[in-house]
Amino acid sequence: MTETRADNVTWLTQEAYDRLKAELDHLSGPGRIEIAQKIEAAREEGDLRENGGYHAAKEEQGKIEGRILQLQSILENARVGEAPRSEGVVGPGMTVTISFEGDDEEVTFLLASREESGVPIDVYSPNSPLGSAINGKKVGDKATYTLPNGRGMTVEILDATPYGG
């Protein structure tokens, strides 16, 4: 599963789409019923101001509703299939190998949405500072991005190939 920032489309494999759809169906159906039952059971315990179980259940309900909204947004903007890619050009769905300036170590990762789970490789978001800096660059190009401490970091793109699973 990968996402492109330009047109706000999330590219999903059929497996990822089905997994996210099943999660949405569960949360918006049985998940809501379960949390409503927890809230009702906690209400019956008495004073809501000092009822930890009630407050925990309400917090869990908020998280579930937030996840439902997130899943709906992802699935509404999803396209099932493979994102258009060019060998040697960094983009979503590509396995990228980089080296950091002043360091001989190479790092390889998948540039994709963080919704992708279960892949046997680190996943970096195209919307992260590093992902944004290297997106669209070609093998041999250098890119600089800003670290959380405000300093700049330069990387060189060593390889960019479509992720093979």
Image: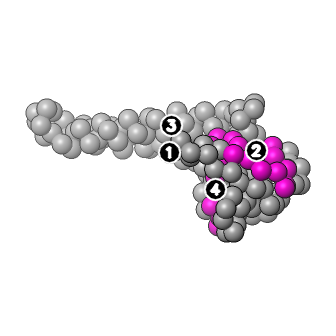
Give the amino acid type for the residue marked by disc 2 in the picture.
Asn
Give the amino acid type for the residue marked by disc 1 in the picture.
Asn
**Mark closer to the observer (2, 1):** 1
Say which mark, if any, is on residue 149: 1
- The picture places residue 80, in percent across and down from the top left corner, at 76, 44
SS category of the residue bearing label 4: strand
Give the colouring mode of the picture. one colour
Q: What stretch is highlighted in magenta?
A: 119-144
Q: How crowded is mark 2: few (under 14 residues within 10 Å), some or many (20 or more)?
A: some
Is the C terminus in the top left, top right, bottom left or bottom right quadrant? bottom right
Residue that carries the numbered disc 4 in the rendered image: 123
Residue that carries the numbered disc 2 in the rendered image: 135
Tell which circle, 4 or 1, labels the residue nearer the N-terminal end.
4
**Mark closer to the observer (3, 2):** 2
**Mark closer to the observer (1, 3):** 1
- The picture places residue 100, in percent across and down from the top left corner, at 67, 59
Q: Residue at the spot x=89%, y=54% of the render?
A: 87
Tell which circle, 3 or 2, labels the residue nearer the N-terminal end.
3
Tell me how far mark 4 sits from mark 2, CA to CA. 14 Å
SS category of the residue bearing label 2: loop
- The picture places residue 65, in percent across and down from the top left corner, at 44, 35
Q: Residue at the spot x=82%, y=51% of the render?
A: 141
Residue that carries the numbered disc 3 in the rendered image: 68
- The picture places residue 136, in percent across and down from the top left corner, at 81, 43
**Mark closer to the observer (4, 3):** 4
Work out which residue is located at the far front of the displayed protein and give it. 102
